[in-house]
Amino acid sequence: MTRRFTAHSPEETVELGRKIGSRLKEGDVIAFRGGLGAGKTTMTRGIALGMGLKDEVSSPTFALVNEYRGALRLCHFDMYRITGASDLESTGFFDYLSDGCVIAIEWSENIADELPDGCIVIEFTVIDGDRREITLIGDERFDF
């Protein structure tokens, strides 16, 4: 199922993320696609809120992964500097896949060959200013 949305502000991106987050389950993997400043971390803030997490979500650019704990755990990866499977191994990514957490991956394009089947794909296209076209490829849980 593919759905397209237009967000006119960061607040609308957060709200869409909240809807997505409220429907996530253990083991879900979200593969974000989009350039710098497209809204990936903003969306992750909304996803965390929808999952009931109270943490302040920030970009994992320098840490590579940020973890947020609640009834479900959210592991937020940044793959900007990752160029292949050997780099990916050093992040612990493969261990997280079998750990039952929800995984959100910024710059998933860099590890496309290593993503598991059935990922939820969220693609961002900057239209202008704060306006974004957001394409969600997932299952019927996201038919809203």
Image (cartoon, grey):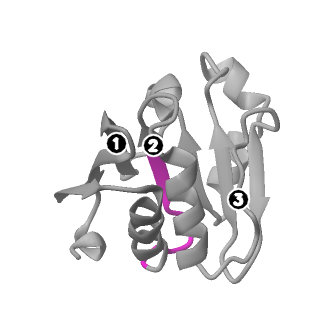
Q: Assess disc 3: are there few (<14), some (14-19) or many (≥20) residues with their C-alpha within 10 Å of its C-alpha.
A: many
Q: Secondary structure at mark 2?
A: strand
User: What is the spatial separation of the Cα atoms under label 1 and label 2, in whole angstroms?
Assistant: 6 Å
Q: Give the mark nearest the N terminus, 1 or 2.
A: 2
Q: Identify the residue shown where x is 30% and y is 75%.
A: 141
Whether pointer 1 and pointer 2 mark residues with C-beta atoms closer than 8 Å, the reply is: yes
User: What is the spatial separation of the Cα atoms under label 2 and label 3, in whole angstroms?
Assistant: 16 Å
Majority secondary structure of magenta residues:
loop
Q: Secondary structure at mark 1?
A: strand
Q: Identify the residue shown where x is 36% and y is 53%.
A: 118
Q: Is residue 67 left or right of 32 when viewed as pictured?
A: right
The part of the image, by quadrant, that contains residue 5 is bottom left
Residue at which label 2 appears: 32
In the image, the segment drawn in magenta is: 23-31
Residue at which label 3 appears: 57
Whether pointer 3 and pointer 1 mark residues with C-beta atoms closer than 8 Å, the reply is: no
Q: Give the mark nearest the N terminus, 2 or 3.
A: 2
Residue at which label 1 appears: 123
Q: Identify the residue shown where x is 23% and y is 76%.
A: 144
User: What is the spatial separation of the Cα atoms under label 3 and label 1, in whole angstroms?
Assistant: 19 Å
Q: Which three-letter amino acid code belongs to the residue tagged 3?
A: Val
On-image quarter of the N terminus: bottom left
Residue 46 within the segment the image draws in magenta: no
Q: Which three-letter amino acid code belongs to the residue tagged 2?
A: Phe
Q: Give the mark nearest the N terminus, 3 or 1.
A: 3
Q: Secondary structure at mark 3?
A: loop
Task: Give the number of the mark in front: 2 or 3.
Answer: 3
Q: Is residue 95 left or right of 121 when viewed as pictured?
A: right
Q: Assess disc 1: are there few (<14), some (14-19) or many (≥20) residues with their C-alpha within 10 Å of its C-alpha.
A: many
- Is residue 35 depicted above or below 8 in this figure? above
